[in-house]
Image: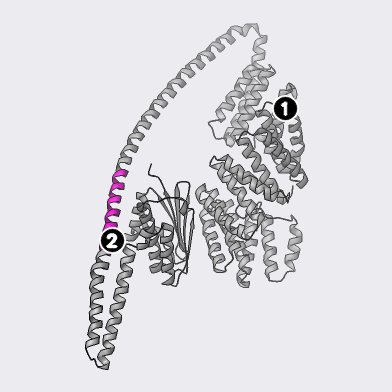
Amino acid sequence: MTLTARRLVFTCSILIFGGCCAGVRAQTGDVAALLQKLATSRPDTNRVKLLNKLGDEYAYNDIKTARRYYHDGYVLSQKLGFVRGIVRYYSSEGELLNLEGQYDRCLALLRQGVALSRARKDPLREGIMYENMGNTFGFMQRLDSATIYYFKSLRLFELFQDSVKVANVYNNLSSIFMKTDKPETALTYINQAIAISRAYEDGFYLSHLINKEAILWKLHRRDEANATSRQVVALAKKLNDTVALADALENNCRHDLDMARYQAILPHAQALNQLSPNLQSPDRTARAHYWLSVGYYYQKQFADALMHIDKALADARPSVGNEHLQTYYAHYGRLLLADRRNPQQASRYFQLADSLRELSLNSTIVKTTRELATQYETEKKEAALQQLSLENQARKRQVSLLVFSVVVLAGALLFFALWMRNRAKVRRQEKALHEQTVRQLESEKQLLASHAILKGQEDERSRLAKDLHDGLGGILSSVKYSFQAMKQTFILSEDNALAFERSMTLLDASLAELRRVSHNMMPESLARLSLADALRDYIQTLTENSAIAFTYQTFGLDTVELDNLYKTSIYRVVQELTTNIVRHAQATDVLVQIMAKAGQINLTVEDNGLGFDPNQVNERRSMGIQNVYHRINYLKGTVDLQTEPGKGCSYYIEIPLSHD
């Protein structure tokens, strides 16, 4: 099997988010040829590409070597000022970090890639970084965040009309909706992906078909799933992807069993067994023997079935997990009962299968099960000898009676233990329910307090703004008009005239500052306009009065109706966070994004400034940040702060649109 095929299988196997961090890259599999080219290459961008290709070759079997080649390409890209090479490194190293489970480090690296792509005005690379961030959030089971970043990347890929990347994002979204138990929506997206990738009939198309088959089975659309399975088999053969073909054949066996097509199992199992030597996997070889045993079982060829289940257990024990072993043991017991060989030994295999449901299989348990199997065979022979001896019949009956008594006693003890456990569980649940009720009451009190604080603040802001504008503003305007009238009636010397003009200038500046402060305390635009337009007006004002490049984006906000509480709270949160950025962050780029969807508002405020230690901020929050958390907590929202010194700051806020 080629490296391309192995990588595709890895991509298809992690359906929770649809692929690895950087996607599936085409690979040659010829490391020697690449090394020969590298030895004679000059230190230019072509050498960077060679180093990256070598890293791709090792990415899934030797992470240490892959990381070395990627890093060498990154160092050379920095020397050359090769931005695409630097962004490629962020993507590739992020993929390795995902494989190692270092998701936070991966996200930090990808955010550097976003910042660099924006700085160099490269939206396509920015989209790739967003897609990678979506994949990483998928690994972390943060599916809402993954969806947001997939849609970010999708808009940019559609802008560039990059159909391959668009298809892969559709595939990722279908996997997200499968994970959130929305198979109908998942089917819509995977069909969009297939509509694009069908023209190429490559590894991407194969992975999309595999995902579609799983979705169709989830929807119980069996005929369509079988038709898709036949497409997978045909394409896997065409692409010489042995692992994908083996997975498809094993799915066929499983589907035959689910739909009671027992006569079809054996041909599929035989085809699977022919592939297993090429897979070099004892676990897959064991599964092939298991399905052969199942096929022969339904053909009532019990001798062949027993032979293959023995082979399955022999191949599986060094590496397989509980689920497969339990299946093998249960099938072994059914075979022994069907062949009427030894009901007692069949019962013991059933007991082994049952025990594996609760235990985590490790090397000690594997050794124990082997010893038990040997012990059972020994007891079987001893029982046969006892049956031949008339003198031991009475003893055998006594042993049987004793065993029966022990089983009855054990059953009674087990029943009592279960009853006691359930009783304790009920008590714990009642206690937990009581504690939850108490916490809920305390939470409601805190929410009422927060509401009172927020309402008091807004009322006070409104009163002060009105007093400043109508009271002090009117007084200053009257003074200005009085001074202007005095200027017409008095004759001033040149020095006094200059001093008078400076005073008038200061008076005008005071009036302008008074209007600005009054507007910030209770902006008129929030009362006249929608939240989206009011924030756009506010961000435009910040852009004009600072050296920071603000980017403001809204998605779906015009489709929801917000009452004044939500409008005011969200406006104040954005106002407080952006004010802190202008005053303290020393940032050059700021993103303010609001997305409304499915009864929820997502707010993102990101900057590329100095950043800070979040632990110190959490210990000593300023009054402004406390107000941000008060407002979000009152709306039953959540705040996710991502920052490090020197690496910017990101606030990810989720606000539900219902208090129920």
Observer-nearest of 27 and 450: 450
Percent coordinates x, y for residue 256 in the rendering: 69, 30
Observer-nearest of 184 and 140: 184
Q: Decide: marks 2, 1 in contact (CB < 8 A)?
A: no
Q: Quadrant of the C terminus?
A: top left
Q: How many numbered marks are there?
A: 2
Label 2, label 1: how far apart the Cα atoms are: 78 Å
Q: Residue 449: within the magenta?
A: yes
Disc 1 on helix, strand or loop? helix
Q: Which portion, as a residue range, is magenta?
A: 443-465
Coloration of the structure image: one colour
Would residue 632 appear left or right of 330 to someone viewing this image? left
Tell me: residue 554, above or below residue 547: above
Identify the image quadrant of residue 83: bottom right
Percent coordinates x, y for residue 124 in the rendering: 61, 62
Percent coordinates x, y for residue 62 in the rendering: 65, 53
Question: Residue placed at 63% from the left, 27% from the top?
Answer: 329
Residue at numbered disc 2: 461
Foreground tag (2 vs 1): 2
Disc 2 residue type (three-letter): Arg
Q: Residue 336: within the magenta?
A: no
Disc with the residue nearer the chain's start (2 vs 1): 1
Disc 1 residue type (three-letter): Gly
Residue at numbered disc 1: 295
Does residue 14 appear in the picture of this structure? no
Tell me: residue 147, above or below residue 584: above
- Magenta part, dominant SS: helix
Would residue 60 appear left or right of 134 to someone viewing this image? right
Observer-nearest of 80 and 373: 80
Label 1 crowd bin: few (<14), some (14–19), many (20+), radius 10 Å: many
Question: Residue placed at 64% from the left, 55% from the top?
Answer: 165
